[in-house]
Amino acid sequence: MSSPEILAPAGSFEALTAAVRCGADAVYLGGQTLNARRNAANFDDAALYEAVSLCHTHGTKLYLTLNTLASDGEMQDVRRMLEYASRIGVDALILQDLGVVRLVRESCDIPMHASTQMSVQTSAGAAKLRELGFVRMVAPRELSRAELLALREKTDLEIELFVHGALCMSVSGQCLMSAVFGGRSGNRGLCAQPCRLAFRAPGGTGHDLSLKDNSLLPHLRTLRDMGMDSFKIEGRMKRPEYVAAAVTACKKALDGAGEDEIFDALRSVFSRSGFTDGYYTGKRGVSMFGTRQKEDVTAASAVLPKLQALYREDKPLYPVRFSLRCAAETPVTLTAHSGNFTAEAQGEVPSAAKNKALDAASAEKQLQKCGGTLFYVDGVETQIEDGLFLPASSLNALRREVLDDLLSQIGKTDSHTYNHVAEDIPPHTSAPIETYVRFADASQIPKDLQADKLFLPLYLGAETIAKHHAVAELPRALFGREDEVRETLLQCKAAGVQEASFASLDGLALIESCSMTPIAFFGSNIYNTSALIQLEAMGVQEAVLSAELTLSEAEKLGGKLRRGLFAYGHLPLMLTRNCPQKNGRACAECRQTGSLTDRKGVTFPIECRSGCAEILNDRPVYLADKALRGVDFRLLYFTVESAETCAAVLRAYEENLPPTGAFTRGPALRGVE
């Protein structure tokens, strides 16, 4: 069985060098903007060109991350980057934003990899990715072994899997905590990691949003046998020694080596109270939580020199065979063959020997000196006439010339096709604004509800959803529940429900399979005009825009698709499969509600539904007194409110009243970075 690709992070050129010299099969890195680690050193255009050259001469692939949400104002930067990436021959793009995906499909032929930020968790979602032209998906970190195996059996997409590195508490692409708390968006590459601060659940650890780093190294051979295609190491913010240790440890684990000093060094260079494999094994709970302790920090100093030695020099990769021809009155000729590549160079005319003549042994000795290059000698053939002299410096110069030529041929990069597609997108013409309402439970619905559209979660069942003539809201997380969700959707359809809403391509695919009308809902991360156009082309009828957009940004989005704004509600800050409350009590005790308290004493509600927990903001977004222009509807999103509160809020929005009590405007006014 072929060995999976080892994919290493490169947040700086030194980390890139460490990755390729330690034998990574591929690296992923970002440019100066539009990547999910904007605080890493990253690569400007010149450095990116050099990085592609370095990788390809080492036989390493380079994947460029364009895996953030892009605003309309950044689309010109996206186009410029696509043109440049096509010209220099990057091997693939890692993407999140459907609007960027649309631009890639229309302008170039660089292979597309679906970022884990796209939140695709099922084979149905994988099929939708295939329709969009993706060749690979990055699997969610939260999948268990059984779920990974089921995904592998049902999709022909390549599957890239995180096997070592930091774990976000939230499902990737479904976290607003950093954006809401400090205006730094994780979806746009500037997460401030507030989850690493003190948050306490009843009976918990005190850091109940901070997970240990993931490590599946003991399972790599099993994962290889399961058919995983790429083993990804997290860590573009990490130092080069970490990259070197992680790549080396992955290679050793695949070779079947037991834990040795490199595994200990990897643990020393970075960990949070050790590692976890809780998602993979299905053993979620308190054992998965951990923080960076003093001993974790001090352990690194002892191992750094040894790890630096792993990538201090290049290791020879390519065999080379030399052929030397040396004859009187003729320039000496050296030919080098490596694989399918050939290089030839001519030197000076040899002189008559006054002392020691050039012979086969002395010539071979000089040509064997390939140290410091990527070549090792696999044979030397000589044709040397007697009585001739050639300085060793001349042979050395010829050797360097042909090896440089070979390396240039080996690293030659084929450009991709790029075609600039001009667009003239008209501004959106919005209808008089309507009010859409979502309730977490039917008991919250007022008897005299006045709303243009009602959304109810799928967990309430087909009968309840149909009774209230509601749209069926699919859960944002479908881990292992694809068939169950499809069956409930079919029951809704049979009961007369025509519309269903989704947060990811998983849900869209399931809705389509049931011949229902799809609506892009909260969590679908619609941030630009191009994404709206892409959704319309996929048959989506309406879309809730990203809650990270300002009112002004939302107003300026073009295209025809009906769109709306999150105008009221306790914003879901995180969607997490490892419930922070499980830290302190069993699910049977929880009754699906709870809370989390931060270091300032602020309490955040938690709702556990459909196999995942949602951590809600402590206060609701309130925009009843703000004019919402350029959109067709406003969404009032009720979660933990009482029926009385729901009724009061609905009246306030009917009359456009100013806020009372604790509230926030969210990113709607201040925006996000």
Image (cartoon, rainbow, N blue to C red):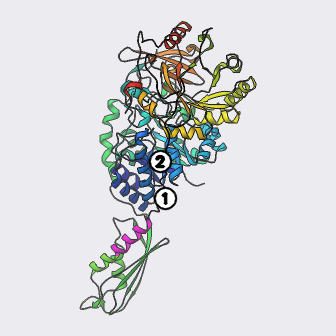
Left/right placement of residue 554 relative to residue 509 reads left
Q: Which mark is residue 497?
A: none
Amino acid type, mark 2? Cys
- Quarter containing the C terminus: top left
Could you say where residue 471 lies in the image, as x and y percent from the top left? 64, 23
**Are there few (<14), some (14-19), or many (20+) residues within 10 Å of tag 2?**
many
Marks 1/2 in contact by CB < 8 Å: the verdict is no
> Which residue is situated farthest in the right direction here?
494
> Which residue is situated farthest in the top direction here?
644
Residue under label 1: 416
Residue 244 in view: yes
- The reply to whether the magenta stretch includes residue 163 is no
In three-dimensional space, the C-alpha distance between marks 1 and 2, rounded to whole angstroms, equals 31 Å
Of residue 178 and residue 293, the one placed in the foreground of this image is 178
In the displayed structure, 222 sits above or below 169; it is below
Residue under label 2: 250
- The reply to whether the magenta stretch includes residue 405 is yes
Could you say where residue 180 lies in the image, as x and y percent from the top left? 40, 25
Q: Quadrant of residue 304?
A: top left
Q: Who's the residue at 44% across and 66% down the image? A: 410
Instruction: Answer with mark 1 or mark 2, whichever residue precedes in sequence.
Output: 2
Q: Quadrant of residue 220?
A: top right
> Which residue is situated farthest in the left direction here?
354
Q: Which residue range is magenta in the image?
A: 399-423
Left/right placement of residue 327 relative to residue 158 reads left
Could you say where residue 542 lies in the image, as x and y percent from the top left? 58, 31
Of residue 396 and residue 54, the one placed in the foreground of this image is 54
- Quarter containing the N terminus: bottom right
**Are there few (<14), some (14-19), or many (20+) residues within 10 Å of tag 1?**
some
Left/right placement of residue 454 relative to residue 599 reads right
Left/right placement of residue 215 relative to residue 372 reads right
* Helix, strand or loop under label 1: loop
